[in-house]
C-alpha cells in the first residue's frame, strides 16, 4: 500500500509523456500537410502548359469566379473576378486557365481560373493576316459580281460586295457565338491618304479651259446640292432626336463623297470631340445606298427629260472624232518600273507634306482643324500644277489613278470588313428616312435645277444623269449613267468633259470645305 502513490505518479508521468508525444506528432503531421499544399501551390511550373496564341487570347469572364495562385483547386485565393471582366489568357493548364488582368491603375494581376468560367471574346489578327483578309475581300467581291449581272449593271464596287459578305459573317459570329474580330489597322490611314493624294495629283488646272462657261455653272449648282444634302441630313436627324453627326454622314459626306470620303470622315467622327461610335457603319450603309440609288435614277431621269421636252439629239456639230479619256477606255499608256516609282514618290511626298501640315495646324491653330486627308489632297493639287507650270515633271495620270484606285479598294475592303452591323439596329429608321429624302431631293434637283440652268438641251439631260450618279454615289456611277444614255440616244462630248472634272476632283475640295464649315456650327 505504501507504493500506491508512486504508482499513481508513474501513471501520471506516462500520460503526460504520451500526451506530449501525440501532440507533437499531430503538429508535425499538420505542418507536413501544410508544406505539401504550399509545395503544390508553388510548383505550378512543373505542370506542362499549353500556350494560347496572341490572336486568340482575349477572353471574358462568364460568371463570378475565384482566382487561384496555382492550377489546383486547393490553391484558391480570396480574390474574386466579376462577371464581364475582360482578361488575357496566357495558357491552358488542364482544367485551369492562366490569365492576366490589367487594372485601371496599370497594374497587372496574374493567376489561374477554372477554364469553364471564361470564354473567348475577341480574335485579334496581325498586320499580315489583315492584309490577306483585305485581298480576300476584293477577290470575293470580284467573284460574286462576275456571277450576278445586277451588280454589274449598277457598277457596285468589289470591296463593297466582298466587304458586306464578310461583315455579315462576322455579325453572325458576334450574334450567335459572341466572338468579335479585331484587325490590325496599320494600313488604314496610309491607304486612305494615298487615295486622296492621287485625287489631288490628278487635278490639272489647265483642264478647266476645256469645260468653259458650262463647267463653272455646273460647279455652282453642284455646290448648292452639297449644302442641301447637309440641310436635309441635319434636319431629319434633329427632328428625330438623333445625333447630328448621323445627319452629316447621311448628307454630302456619303451622298456626294461616296465610300472613300465617308470612311475618311467616319474615322474623324469616331475620335474626340465627336465620339460617334457607329460612324463607320453609318457611313458605309449610306454610301452603299447612294451608290445603288444613283445608278437607278440617273438613266430614267435623262430619259424623262428627253421625252418630256422632245430634246433634239446632237448632230454633226459635235466633234465625235475628238478623243477623250473616258470615251476611249481601251487606249493605254505603258506603266514602267521607273515611271511607277516616280508616281509612288509623288504620292509619298503628298503623304509626308500633308501629315506635317496637319500636325503643324493642330499645334498652332487648334481651332481650325481639317482632317489630314484634306491636306494631302491640297498638297497633290499644288504639287501637280507646280510641276506642270515649271515643266519639271509631267504627272502620269493613268499611273497615279491606278495607285489611287488600288489604295481605295484596299482601304474600302478594310472599312467594310470591320463594320459592326449590330450598331446599326438603333439607327435604322432615322437613317432610312434621311436616305429616302436624299433620293427625292436628287431627282428633283436634277430635273428642276441642273437641267434647267445647264441649257435645257440634250447635253443638260446627260449632265443631269451624271449628276444623279455622283450626287448620290460616285464618279464611276455617273460615267455609267451617261454612257447608258449616250449609247441609246447619241454622244455628249461636253458632259464627258465636265462630269469627270467635277465628280472626280472639284467636288471633293468643295465638299471638304463645306463639311468643315457646317461642323463649326454644330454643338461640339
Image (cartoon, rainbow, N blue to C red):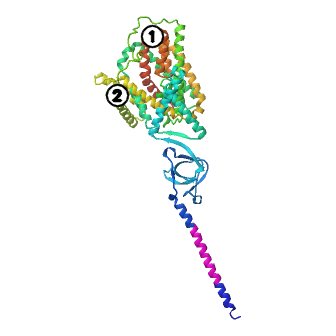
Question: Magenta residues?
Answer: 14-33
Residue 280: image x %, image y %? 51, 32
Q: CA distance from mark 2 to mark 1?
A: 34 Å
Q: What number is the disc on residue 412?
A: none
Query: Is residue 109 among the parts visible in the rendering?
Result: yes
Which residue does the numbered mark 2 point to in the structure image?
340
Q: Position of residue 515 (x, y in %)?
A: 47, 27
Name the residue: 48% across, 5% down: 312
For image coordinates 60% across by 28% down, the residue present is: 429
Q: Which of label 2 and label 1 is nearer to you?
A: 2
Q: Which mark is residue 491?
A: 1
Residue 211 horizontal side relative to residue 173, left or right: left
Q: Is residue 130 left or right of residue 435?
A: left
Check disc 2: other Cα within 10 Å, few if <14, some if 14-19, many if 20+. some
Question: Furthest residue to the right?
Answer: 1
Disc 1 element = loop
Residue at left 54%, top 58%? 70
Within the image, what quadrant is residue 425 found in? top right
Q: Magenta segment: does it hold 352? A: no
On screen, residue 213 above or below 338: above
Amino acid at each position: 500500500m505504501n507504493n500506491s502513490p508512486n504508482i499513481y505518479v508513474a501513471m501520471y508521468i506516462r500520460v503526460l509523456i504520451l500526451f506530449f508525444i501525440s501532440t507533437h506528432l499531430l503538429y508535425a503531421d499538420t505542418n507536413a500537410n501544410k508544406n505539401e499544399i504550399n509545395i503544390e501551390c508553388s510548383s505550378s511550373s512543373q505542370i506542362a502548359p499549353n500556350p494560347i496564341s496572341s490572336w486568340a487570347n482575349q477572353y471574358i469572364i462568364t460568371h463570378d469566379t475565384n482566382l487561384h495562385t496555382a492550377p489546383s483547386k486547393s490553391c484558391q485565393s480570396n480574390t474574386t473576378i466579376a462577371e464581364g471582366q475582360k482578361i488575357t489568357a496566357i495558357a491552358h493548364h488542364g482544367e485551369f486557365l492562366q490569365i492576366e488582368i490589367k487594372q485601371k491603375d496599370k497594374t497587372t494581376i496574374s493567376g489561374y481560373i477554372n477554364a469553364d468560367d471564361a470564354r473567348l471574346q475577341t480574335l485579334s489578327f496581325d498586320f499580315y493576316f489583315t492584309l490577306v483578309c483585305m485581298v480576300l475581300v476584293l477577290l470575293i467581291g470580284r467573284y460574286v459580281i462576275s456571277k450576278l449581272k445586277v451588280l454589274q449593271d449598277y457598277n457596285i464596287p468589289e470591296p463593297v460586295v466582298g466587304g458586306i459578305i464578310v461583315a455579315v459573317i462576322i455579325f453572325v459570329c458576334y450574334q450567335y457565338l459572341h466572338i468579335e474580330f479585331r484587325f490590325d489597322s496599320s494600313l488604314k490611314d496610309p491607304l486612305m491618304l494615298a487615295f486622296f493624294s492621287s485625287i489631288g495629283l490628278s487635278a490639272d488646272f489647265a483642264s478647266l479651259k476645256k469645260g468653259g462657261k458650262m463647267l463653272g455653272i455646273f460647279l455652282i449648282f453642284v455646290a448648292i446640292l452639297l449644302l442641301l444634302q447637309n440641310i436635309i441630313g441635319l434636319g431629319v436627324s434633329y427632328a428625330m432626336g438623333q445625333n447630328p453627326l448621323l445627319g452629316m454622314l447621311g448628307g454630302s459626306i456619303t451622298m456626294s463623297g461616296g465610300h472613300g470620303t465617308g470612311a475618311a470622315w467616319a474615322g474623324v467622327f469616331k475620335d474626340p470631340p465627336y465620339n460617334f461610335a457607329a460612324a463607320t457603319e453609318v457611313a458605309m450603309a449610306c454610301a452603299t445606298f447612294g451608290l445603288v440609288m444613283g445608278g437607278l435614277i440617273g438613266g430614267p431621269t435623262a430619259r424623262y427629260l428627253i421625252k418630256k421636252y422632245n430634246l433634239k439629239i446632237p448632230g454633226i456639230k459635235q466633234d465625235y472624232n475628238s478623243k477623250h479619256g473616258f470615251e476611249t477606255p481601251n487606249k493605254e499608256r505603258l506603266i514602267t518600273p521607273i515611271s511607277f516609282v516616280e508616281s509612288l514618290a509623288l504620292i509619298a511626298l503628298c503623304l509626308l507634306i500633308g501629315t506635317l501640315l496637319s500636325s503643324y495646324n493642330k499645334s498652332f491653330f487648334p481651332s481650325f482643324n481639317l482632317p489630314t486627308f484634306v491636306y494631302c489632297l491640297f498638297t497633290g493639287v499644288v504639287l501637280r500644277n507646280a510641276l506642270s507650270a515649271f515643266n519639271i515633271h509631267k504627272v502620269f495620270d493613268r499611273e497615279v489613278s491606278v495607285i489611287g484606285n488600288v489604295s481605295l479598294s484596299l482601304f474600302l475592303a478594310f472599312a467594310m470588313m470591320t463594320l459592326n452591323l449590330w450598331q446599326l439596329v438603333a439607327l435604322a429608321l432615322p437613317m432610312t428616312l434621311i436616305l429616302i429624302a436624299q433620293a427625292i431631293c436628287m431627282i428633283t434637283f436634277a430635273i428642276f435645277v441642273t437641267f434647267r440652268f445647264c441649257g435645257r438641251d440634250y447635253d443638260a439631260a446627260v449632265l443631269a444623269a451624271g449628276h444623279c450618279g455622283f450626287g448620290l454615289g460616285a464618279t464611276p456611277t455617273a460615267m455609267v449613267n451617261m454612257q447608258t444614255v449616250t449609247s441609246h440616244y447619241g454622244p455628249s462630248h461636253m458632259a464627258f468633259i465636265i462630269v469627270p472634272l467635277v465628280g472626280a476632283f472639284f467636288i471633293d475640295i468643295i465638299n471638304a470645305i463645306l463639311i468643315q464649315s457646317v461642323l463649326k456650327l454644330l454643338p461640339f
